[in-house]
Image (cartoon, rainbow, N blue to C red):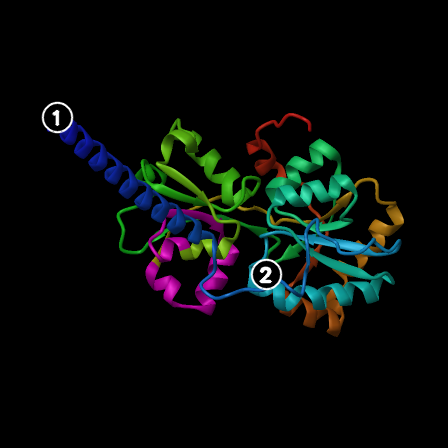
Amino acid sequence: MQWQGKNADTIFTSLVAAVAVVFALAFEIRESMVGRADEPLSLADLQPCCESASPRPARLLRFAVAPLLTPGIALSGLPAFGRYLAGRIGRPVETVNCRTFAEIEAQIRLGEADVAFLGSGPFVTGREEFGLVPLAVPVVAGSATGRTYLVVPEDGPVRGWADLRGKVMAFTDSLSSSGKLVPTFALTGLGATPDGFFRRVVYTHGVMHSIKAVAHGHVDGASVDGAVFDAAVRQDPSFGRRLRVAWRSAAFGNGPVVVDGRMPGDHRARIAAALTGMRADPAGRQALARLGLDGFERFEPRAYDALAAMVPRRRPR
């Protein structure tokens, strides 16, 4: 009977462990769903990052893109943008989709990508670390600058960063300004860091994914690009009814179009002229509209000074 009791205890312990594993897996699956859009999404129109199926033609210009744009805009607008740019600079252009800003950095460093839409955070870091050169800055909703929003549920108690202590937070990308850098700097005012302040941080790898994660109750808050959030509310007013902006950052420059400093100056000038001239060209305006952009402006260094001061020093790779 003693043996049977121990055996029963063992069986019971095993069952408890099994149930715990099931719940843990269910939680992880739920958390992993945060990064997915509601609807199925195919990126077949874009060349996957780092997965070129054939040798690269000598004159081909590779234009890399990361989560700066929403997936829907990327699918509908980027191929047309690439075709327009190719016609203006007289070189074939291939649009390359990357999942993270770190992938874009790697592609630029390795010479696999020539031009990139890059967030303002990874730009100020890359400019210092390996000589990224800005060509032009996108104008969104009439402005070449933007703000970071802290987005929370409309009916929740959160009124600022202090109310998120011990909560689940959505960040977009480890190098993103709005999606990591700015909120991390904001927490320094509370004498805190993300690791010690939040119960859990989820990386969604997409601004719309972060917005939806809050709307669906997967996370308690998200730090997102304000222009993307405003556009999401215009397109789907239900976001405005379900979500609230609890905090706004100071303005800083939008993420620029960048190239490696090794690109010849005449090539850089040709691409920059094509971008800044889009608003004056009817075909260019059509391509811009499909990207949700008003145009491109010349780079203004001072717009990034405050952001550069937030960037922690990283060891050279």
**Is residue 250 visible to us here?**
no
The reply to whether discs 2 and 1 touch (Cβ–Cβ < 8 Å) is: no
In which quadrant of the rendered view does residue 177 lie?
top right
Q: Is residue 84 above or below residue 257?
A: below
**Is residue 102 visible to us here?**
yes
Q: Is residue 315 above or below residue 44?
A: above
- Give the residues drawn in magenta, as a range: 213-242
Q: Nearer the viewer, residue 289 or 219?
A: 219
Q: Which residue carries the number 2 mark?
A: 142
| 3D distance between C-alphas at marks 2 and 1 | 79 Å
Q: Position of residue 215 (x, y in %)?
A: 36, 57
Lower position in the chain sequence, tag 2 or tag 1 = 1
* 285 horizontally vs 205: left or right: right
Q: Residue at x 38, y 62 (%)?
A: 240
Q: Nearer the viewer, residue 221 or 147?
A: 221
Q: Which residue carries the number 1 mark?
A: 2
